[in-house]
């Protein structure tokens, strides 16, 4: 098991290197720079700034020193936020994004898996149809449409919740963003759970349990263990989708998370900030995929034997 | 059996909706009576409605604005069906040439002077009222939203189909080659695919579009580069099982080259699942396109797409919610239909439900 974890993490290293190289050269080969302000700087000042940040050296040398700093765990200074290091900015933004993402994950799992179970148990009934249609609808509702609609309904009309913004420790600012982020995933999880639980419910062992008169709740509990495998395997991509979705949600709701730092950093040509966020996202995706695989192995004895 | 029919019914209904939407986007703008980029400065952010514009509520502010431009005041006006009896007053004699402001506002036709009083300081005019029908209202610049939504639909649908096609070609090629080659080549190609899966692609797409100036071609390329991975996996899995089938062996025994076998025997036999995956890919691509356009990174003015219109609507949501509703309705109808169609196809091709 530990060998598997180490091997998977080892496989992640080339991926991370590719992420760093790709984002580094993509940004540097593009026209424009972090000091292109609306009022152009004098050539001398520009020269000085570029020297201070090491931008005057050859690209390969800059890449080398970035990698060297990265190996020491140093993500470098931010170009656009004065006197802030990228690590400091991420330390500020990550708790917001993590709270948002984890809450959305929990909401999506509870409602998605719950509704999927109901649909599978009431197969072909009207509840099943309604859930199926609702799932297709949430999957087709873009977050950038849902978010303004929620803002109108709960922020402007009902005035129950703040429109946007963020105050430390006020959970009311998180409700609409979490809802927006979780909604499409509820649909995805419900469909997945319905399909796989429906399949398991038609297998011989389940039929036998039913024939012996086990109460439906117990049957479902046994069936669910097997049926959750594809759902758990989906948690890796799901986490990636939540990370991507947070870019839009944080921008619309004005939350100071890493998604917004990414957008602002990209617009301001803040090379180090963008690299830091992309790297963080890549690490998170790799680790979460690994976690999902481990959870699968824990649920499914066949996979455990295989590894 | 009944269930299959019901599923097929929703798929058929989706197909009809899609065909109608595509037809409306293709030929509709010619029949709405408005150019997509024609401005009606006096009819900004007009809500959706069936009544012909200008209606009585619009008339007075519009007349006041025009009179101001003519350096005159509206002394009196009365609407009589399609005609307007308008009396203008001013401190100086009114310049007749300034009457062109009336037809120029798009709301009225060329006026004729009925009477001139007080040495030209009062003019009584007979003005024909134009009838504009703006079913879905207008945007912040006073452009017809129906026409704009339809024209935007062309771009969104075209992007969705083109990017899917490109992703399809890459994915099918990659998957078929990996699956048919097998062995070390397959292992290496799949390892590369796994590595690509772990990349935060959407972040790269955003970077690409921010740093190099956003354009339609670049966005197409970026979307296709992201979305071919699933297709490659599906085709490879199919190819692995097809490779050992008798008809492929027979083709090999007859001396057909590997490339010929892949093209003639493997790829055509993978098309069922590929069609399902492609149908489900189109809505994902359209969603990604609108997402990028919403962020201002996709389709650029003067071109427009549903994502662009939704972004405009989201900005004006307090004053004019219809600006979000119109393009969002088109987008959601398209996405729902495509998703239902894909599900129906998948069900129809699934041997277990047959």
Image: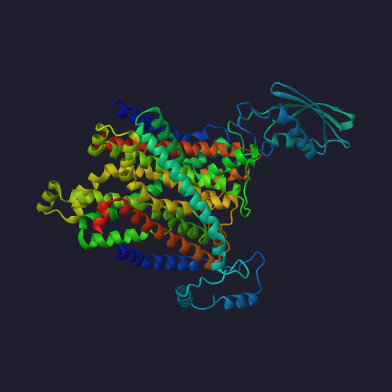
Residue B139 or A131: which is nearer the viewer? A131
Where B108 sits versus A51, above or below? above
User: Is there any visible trace of residue B299 in the rendered image?
Assistant: no
In the rendered image, the vertical position of residue A222 relative to residue B178, given as above or below: above
Instruction: Give the camera-side residue of B238 and A89.
Output: A89
Q: Quadrant of residue B79?
A: top right
- Residue at image position (29%, 43%) is B273
Q: Could you say where residue A154 lies in the image, as x and y percent from the top left?
A: 61, 39
Q: Quadrant of the C terminus of chain A?
A: bottom left
A175 horizontally vs A124: left or right: right
Residue at 12% across / 53% down in the picture?
B252
Q: Which residue is drawn at 32% across and 64% down?
A: A2
Which part of the image, by quadrant, shows the N terminus of chain A? Answer: bottom left
Q: Is residue B299 above or below residue B118?
A: below
- B280 or A204, which is in the foreground? A204
Image location (x, y in percent) of residue B282: 40, 44
> In the image, residue A27 lies at what x, y percent?
49, 66
Residue located 58% across and 33% down the image: B136
Residue at the farthest left position: B253
Q: In which quarter of the image is residue B116?
A: top right
Across and down, in percent, residue B64 comes to 78, 34
Q: In this view, does A292 lie to the left or right of B273?
A: right
The figure's colour scheme reads: rainbow
Marks counted in the figure total 0
Task: Kindly tell me whether residue B2 is visible in this rendering.
Answer: yes
């Amino acid at each position: 098991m530990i060998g598997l974890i180490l091997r998977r993490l080892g496989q992640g290293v080339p991926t991370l290197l590719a992420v760093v190289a790709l984002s580094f050269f993509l940004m540097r080969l593009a026209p424009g720079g972090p000091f292109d302000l609306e009022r152009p700087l004098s050539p001398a000042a520009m020269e000085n700034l570029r020297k201070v940040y090491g931008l005057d050296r050859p690209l390969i040398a800059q890449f080398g020193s970035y990698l060297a700093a990265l190996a020491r765990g140093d993500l470098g200074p931010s170009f656009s936020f004065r006197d802030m290091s990228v690590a400091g900015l991420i330390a500020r933004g990550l708790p917001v994004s993590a709270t948002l993402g984890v809450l959305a994950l929990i909401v999506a799992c509870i409602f998605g898996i719950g509704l999927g179970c109901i649909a599978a148990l009431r197969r072909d009934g009207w509840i099943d149809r309604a859930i199926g249609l609702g799932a297709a609808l949430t999957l087709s509702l873009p977050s950038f449409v849902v978010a303004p609609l929620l803002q109108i309904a709960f922020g402007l009309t009902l005035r129950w919740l703040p429109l946007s913004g963020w105050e430390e420790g006020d959970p009311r600012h998180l409700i609409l963003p979490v809802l927006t982020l979780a909604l499409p995933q509820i649909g995805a999880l419900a469909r997945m759970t319905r399909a796989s639980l429906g399949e398991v419910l038609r297998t011989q062992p389940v039929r036998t349990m039913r024939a012996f008169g086990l109460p439906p709740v117990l049957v479902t509990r046994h069936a669910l263990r097997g049926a959750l495998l594809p759902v758990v395997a989906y948690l890796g991509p799901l986490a990636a989708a939540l990370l991507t979705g947070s870019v839009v949600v944080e921008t619309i709701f004005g939350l100071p998370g890493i998604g917004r730092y990414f957008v602002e950093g990209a617009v301001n040509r803040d090379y180090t900030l963008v690299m830091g966020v992309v790297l963080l996202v890549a690490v998170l995706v790799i680790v979460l995929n690994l976690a999902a695989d481990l959870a699968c192995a824990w649920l499914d004895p066949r996979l455990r034997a295989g590894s | 059996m009944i269930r299959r029919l019901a599923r097929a019914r929703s798929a058929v209904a989706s197909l009809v909706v899609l065909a109608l939407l595509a037809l409306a986007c293709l030929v509709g703008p010619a029949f709405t009576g408005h150019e997509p980029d024609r401005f009606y400065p006096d009819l900004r952010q007009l809500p959706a409605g069936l009544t012909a514009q200008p209606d009585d509520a619009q008339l007075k502010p519009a007349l006041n604005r025009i009179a101001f431009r003519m350096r005159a005041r509206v002394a009196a006006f009365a609407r009589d069906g399609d005609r307007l009896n308008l009396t203008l007053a001013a401190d100086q004699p009114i310049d007749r040439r300034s009457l062109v402001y009336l037809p120029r506002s798009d709301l009225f036709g060329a006026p004729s002077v009925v009477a001139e009083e007080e040495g030209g300081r009062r003019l009584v005019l007979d003005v024909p009222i134009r009838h504009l029908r703006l079913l879905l209202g207008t945007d912040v610049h006073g452009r017809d939203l129906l026409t704009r939504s339809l024209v935007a639909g062309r771009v969104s649908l075209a992007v969705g189909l083109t990017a899917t096609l490109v992703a399809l070609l890459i994915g099918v090629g990659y998957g078929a080659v990996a699956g048919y080659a097998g062995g070390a080549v397959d292992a290496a190609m799949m390892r590369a695919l796994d590595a690509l899966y772990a990349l935060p692609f959407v972040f790269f797409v955003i970077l690409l579009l921010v740093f190099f100036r956003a354009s339609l071609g670049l966005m197409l390329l970026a979307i296709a580069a992201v979305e071919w991975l699933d297709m490659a996996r599906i085709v490879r899995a199919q190819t692995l099982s097809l490779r050992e089938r008798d008809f492929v062996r027979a083709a090999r025994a007859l001396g057909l080259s590997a490339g010929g076998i892949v093209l003639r025997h493997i790829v055509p036999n993978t098309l069922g699942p590929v069609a399902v995956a492609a149908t489900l890919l189109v809505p994902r691509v359209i969603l990604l396109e609108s997402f990028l356009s919403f962020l201002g990174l996709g389709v650029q003015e003067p071109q427009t797409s549903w994502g662009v219109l939704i972004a405009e609507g989201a900005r004006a949501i307090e004053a004019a919610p219809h600006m979000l509703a119109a393009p969002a309705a088109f987008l959601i109808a398209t996405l729902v239909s495509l998703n239902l169609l894909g599900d129906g196809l998948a069900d129809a091709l699934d041997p277990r439900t047959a």
